[in-house]
């Protein structure tokens, strides 16, 4: 089908602010109106996500939908100010955008909303506002709980990606407006945007428990508010997979879930593969809920998930062996808990066994083999051989017997523990020990033990007092084969994934009171066959690879200073894409970023994180560059965050910002 692409149009808000939209229309939509699909994010429709938008939204237009891609207020070419993530203003604007869409001559009045990550969040948040025209959503790689499962905190521990993402947002939000769209006033608006730029990482570091700040936009606060059908998408290599089973369990509307092996990438481009025909599934979903066509989509299993087979623990993984399984219900009656008790001899047993308590104090650089918190399909980002970290943890093994077994869901580790410090962390890894001796991480979780009873009201530990603690690991799907060993490991730090606790605590674990609970699938029951068509795409974006870029990732230990260093470096593109030029708009993008995290294994207060980046964009007659440096350190009572930003037009420096904030630590 021939499609019409409207490169730019303004959508006026009631307060006079104009949002910039790019629209893909099917042939004949102006005379025969069609439903619309909205994606609404701050990542610049004209250049930032152009390479992804064209083949996806073009495909929807080819299949009879008006696809509307809108830059949020204060982002891309839209007017106004973006002060933070997921503000009420963002939702209010979305409601006005939906009203505007339904008033167009090409729209039938039915709207779907979709997106991944930020737009996966806000389509759930907007659904909870119940606009009448919104008939269904597709939410990929999102969360229902902004504190527990976003890029800022994990298990009540501060993620180091909080600084990474906050620093990237400084660069993203200080990019200039395109003069072709903004006109002669583009420079003034660019400089105003930089002048009003918030220091994002400090905003988020200041909220260290599940307070009103995080409750806003966390749809788990009222599941019943969402009254339109939801399809939820996740990936085992991504960091937002826990949301899918929670949505399926708690939503009170028709819902479906798909979890594949992928990182933070739409499934039709999914890495690790296999990628699937996600756009075809999306059209089946839209046809059912927006056009009233029975496509059979609602006869699919409630959850379709990929169960991973064990592989060598290499940092780069392009393909993931395994198989698709279907669960007609969720929670599934085919998944039953298997309880394994920790023993003082380092074994996992079906029955508890008496034995002495065990102590563990991990080195502060324990976690070197963790890989990235959020996989994005980059080289070297996957967890590597866990033997590097096993030496700093307590390890408990089970020999896999018979035909083996598979798990699907969230494992739990119940610990009877005490700490010698009032603030402490526990890091738990579930692993597959291969016959070669290599150790593959299957799932993990960290927990700030002052959050042991919930994330809203942390309480210090009484040193020496025993506590029952439940650690719910991230949801996973994995097959354990005979001849392998299942291993659960317990440590007290997880660097460089999370910022260390202020004390190098020793935990005392009483094995007799501790157990691992696995969600084991009963393979004797009927197995639903699941398959997907191969990936499809709409018209690809005309673009030129100017430079392939480079990605580096390494760790080192200085035996003279006792400092452990972890470095990642991307040249040309943030996610390894290199330097690209979008030919239709003659715009070239280059993003360089270097992270360096250092710590002494014996001193949590030695932690230091420095992030340096530059973002260049433009064309021969319009060249711009933004450079930022951010740094984080801490002492026992405070976090210290610094930042600087310099913007250039050509070689002329046109703007600069400096930030320095000291934030009290609240049991973290």
Image (tube, helix red, strand yellow):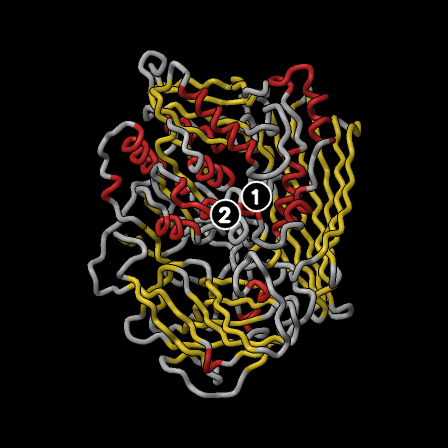
Q: Point out residue 384 in the picture as x, y percentages from the top left corner.
A: 53, 62
Residue at 77% x, 46% y is 660
* In the foreground, 612 or 534: 612
Say whether residue 467 is left or right of residue 174. Answer: left
In the rendered view, would you say 51 is above or below 460?
A: above
For image coordinates 49% across by 31% down, the residue present is 40
Query: Badge 2: how crowded within 10 Å, few (<14), some, or many (20+)?
Result: many
Q: Which residue lies furthest to the bottom in this view?
A: 355
- The spot of residue 173 in percent (x, y) is 64, 34
Q: Are marks 2 and 1 in contact (CB under 8 Å)?
A: yes
* Percent position of residue 561, x then y: 77, 68
Q: Quarter holding the C terminus?
A: bottom right
Question: Which residue does the image show at 69% across and 38% down from the upper left?
Answer: 198
Indicate the quadrant containing the N terminus: top left, top right, bottom left or bottom right.
top left
Q: Residue 114, located in which quarter of the rendered image?
A: top left
Q: Is mark 1 on a helix, strand or loop?
A: loop
> Which image quadrant for residue 280?
top left
Residue 327 seen in the current view:
yes
Looking at the image, which residue is at 33% across and 17% down? 33
* The disc label shown at residue 606, or none: none
Disc 1: which residue: 576
In the picture of the structure, the residue carrying the numbered disc 2 is: 377
């Amino acid at each position: 089908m021939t499609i019409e692409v409207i490169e730019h149009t303004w959508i006026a808000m009631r307060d006079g602010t104009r949002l910039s939209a790019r629209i893909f229309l099917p042939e004949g939509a102006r005379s025969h109106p069609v439903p619309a699909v909205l994606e609404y994010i701050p990542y610049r429709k004209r250049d930032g996500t152009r390479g992804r938008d064209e083949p996806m939204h073009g495909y929807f237009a080819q299949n009879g939908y008006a696809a509307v891609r809108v830059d949020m207020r204060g982002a891309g070419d839209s007017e106004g100010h973006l002060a933070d993530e997921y503000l009420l203003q963002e939702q209010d604007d979305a409601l006005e955008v939906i009203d505007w869409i339904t008033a167009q001559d090409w729209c039938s009045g039915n709207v779907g909303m979709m997106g991944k990550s930020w737009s996966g969040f806000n389509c759930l948040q907007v659904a909870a506002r119940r606009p009448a025209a919104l008939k269904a959503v597709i939410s990929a790689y999102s969360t229902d709980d902004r504190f527990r499962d976003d890029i800022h905190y994990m298990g009540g521990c501060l993620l180091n990606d909080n600084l990474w993402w906050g620093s990237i947002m400084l660069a993203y939000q200080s990019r200039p407006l395109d003069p072709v769209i903004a006109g002669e006033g583009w420079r003034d608006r660019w400089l105003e945007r930089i002048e009003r730029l918030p220091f994002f990482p400090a905003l988020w570091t200041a909220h260290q428990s599940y307070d009103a700040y995080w409750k806003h936009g966390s749809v788990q606060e009222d599941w019943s508010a969402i009254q339109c059908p939801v399809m939820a998408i996740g990936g085992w290599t991504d960091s937002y997979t826990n949301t899918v089973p929670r949505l399926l369990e708690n939503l009170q509307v028709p819902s479906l879930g798909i979890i594949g092996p992928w990182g933070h990438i739409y499934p039709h481009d999914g890495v690790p593969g296999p990628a699937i025909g996600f756009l075809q599934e999306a059209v089946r979903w839209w046809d059912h809920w927006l056009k009233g066509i029975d496509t059979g989509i609602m006869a699919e299993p409630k959850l379709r998930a990929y169960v991973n087979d064990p592989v060598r623990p290499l940092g780069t993984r392009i393909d993931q062996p395994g198989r698709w399984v279907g669960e007609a219900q969720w929670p599934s009656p085919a998944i039953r808990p298997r309880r394994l008790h920790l023993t003082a001899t380092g074994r996992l047993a079906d029955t508890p066994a008496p034995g002495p308590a065990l102590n563990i104090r991990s080195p502060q650089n324990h976690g070197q083999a963790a890989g990235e918190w959020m996989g994005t399909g980059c080289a070297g980002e996957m967890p590597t051989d866990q033997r590097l970290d096993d030496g700093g943890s307590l390890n408990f093994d089970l020999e896999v017997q018979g035909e083996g077994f598979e798990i699907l869901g969230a494992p739990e580790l119940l610990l009877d523990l005490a700490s010698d410090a009032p603030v402490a962390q526990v890091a738990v890894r579930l692993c597959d020990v291969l016959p070669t001796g290599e150790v593959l991480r299957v799932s993990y979780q960290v927990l700030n033990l002052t959050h042991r009873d919930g994330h809203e009201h942390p309480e210090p530990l009484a040193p020496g007092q025993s506590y029952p603690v439940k650690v719910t690991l991230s949801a996973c799907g994995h097959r354990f084969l005979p001849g392998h060993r299942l291993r659960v490991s317990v440590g007290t730090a997880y660097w460089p994934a999370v910022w260390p606790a202020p004390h190098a605590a020793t935990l005392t674990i009483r094995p007799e009171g501790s157990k691992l609970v696995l969600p084991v699938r009963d393979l004797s029951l009927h197995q639903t066959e699941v398959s997907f068509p191969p990936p499809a795409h709409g018209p690809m974006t005309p673009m030129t690879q100017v430079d392939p870029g480079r990605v580096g990732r390494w760790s080192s230990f200085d035996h003279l200073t006792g400092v452990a260093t972890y470095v990642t470096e991307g040249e040309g593109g943030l996610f390894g894409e290199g330097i690209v030029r979008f030919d239709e708009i003659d715009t070239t993008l280059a993003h360089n970023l270097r992270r360096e995290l250092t710590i002494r294994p014996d001193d949590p207060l030695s932690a230091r994180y420095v992030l340096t980046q530059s973002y260049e964009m433009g064309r021969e007659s319009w060249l711009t560059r933004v450079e930022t440096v951010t740094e984080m350190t801490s002492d026992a009572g405070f976090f210290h965050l610094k930042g600087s930003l310099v913007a250039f037009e050509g070689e002329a420096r046109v703007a600069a910002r400096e930030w320095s904030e000291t934030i009290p630590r609240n049991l973290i």
